[in-house]
């Protein structure tokens, strides 16, 4: 009986130490980055890869800005209306030249790595 109580107390102590450890961790974690906009996710990724801004055009009549980015043989476009880049739309091309409307970062990454893998 005493051994059982001792084991329970030891387990409670270990459990409380684990809880205290996680309480001391910084509040910033990987979960804080999940609510970023598509624009910021894509720009964080293209900055890490090394894409270059090839050109930027502004249509003052429609109040839209189109940015053209490239890396080796891969190109994609970003179109923003009223300088609202958080709601911008992205467009790229797959390895066969077909248009892909980018709805997530994964769409862009898939097209990019397909294109890069076809280089010789």
Image (cartoon, grey):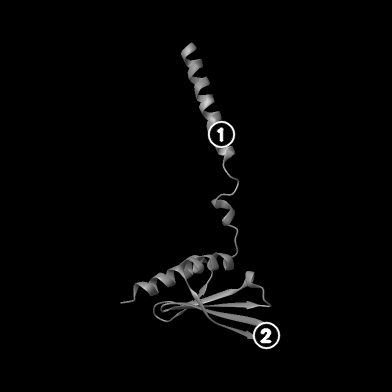
Q: Which residue is mark 1?
A: 19
In this picture, residue 95 sits left or right of residue 48? left
Say whether residue 48 is visible: yes
Residue at the left extreme of this rendering: 120
**Element class at badge 2:** loop
Circle 1 Cα neighbour tier, 10 Å, few/some/many (<14 / 14–19 / ≥20): few
Q: Position of residue 3 (x, y in %)?
A: 46, 14
The residue drawn where x is 53% and y is 67% is 42
Label tally: 2
Of residues 15 and 107, the one nearer the viewer is 15
Q: Secondary structure at mark 1?
A: helix
Residue 1 is situated, as x and y percent measured from the top left of the image, at: 48, 11
In the displayed structure, would residue 65 be above or below residue 113?
below
Foreground: 44 or 39? 44
Query: Vertical placement of 61 versus 85: above or below?
Result: below
The residue singled out by tag 2 in the image is 62
Q: Is residue 29 above or below residue 65?
A: above
N-terminal of the two: label 2 or label 1? Answer: 1
Question: How far separated are the C-alphas under marks 2 and 1?
Answer: 56 Å
Q: Are marks 2 and 1 in contact (CB under 8 Å)?
A: no
Residue for point 63% across, 69% down:
86
Q: Is residue 1 visible?
A: no
**Tag 2: Cα neighbours inside 10 Å, few (<14), some, or many (≥20)?**
few
The residue sitting at 68% across, 86% down in the picture is: 60
91 vs 80, left or right, is left
Residue 65, image quadrant: bottom right
Position of residue 27 relative to residue 5, above or below, is below
On the image, the x and y values in percent for residue 46 come to: 50, 69
Instruction: Tell me if 117 is positioned left or right of 54 in this view.
Output: left
Look at the image and tell me in which quarter the C terminus lies: bottom left
Which of discs 2 and 1 lies nearer the camera? The answer is: 1
């Amino acid at each position: 009986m005493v051994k059982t109580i001792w084991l329970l107390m030891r387990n409670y102590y270990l459990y409380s130490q684990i809880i205290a450890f996680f309480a001391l961790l910084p509040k910033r974690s990987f979960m804080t980055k999940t609510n970023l906009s598509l624009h910021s996710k894509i720009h964080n990724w293209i900055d890490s890869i090394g894409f270059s801004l090839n050109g930027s055009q502004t249509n003052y009549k429609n109040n839209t800005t189109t940015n053209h980015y490239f890396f080796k043989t891969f190109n994609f476009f970003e179109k923003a209306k009223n300088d609202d880049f958080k709601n911008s739309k992205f467009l790229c091309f797959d390895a066969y030249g077909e248009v892909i409307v980018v709805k997530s970062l994964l769409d862009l990454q898939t097209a990019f790595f397909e294109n890069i893998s076809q280089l010789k």
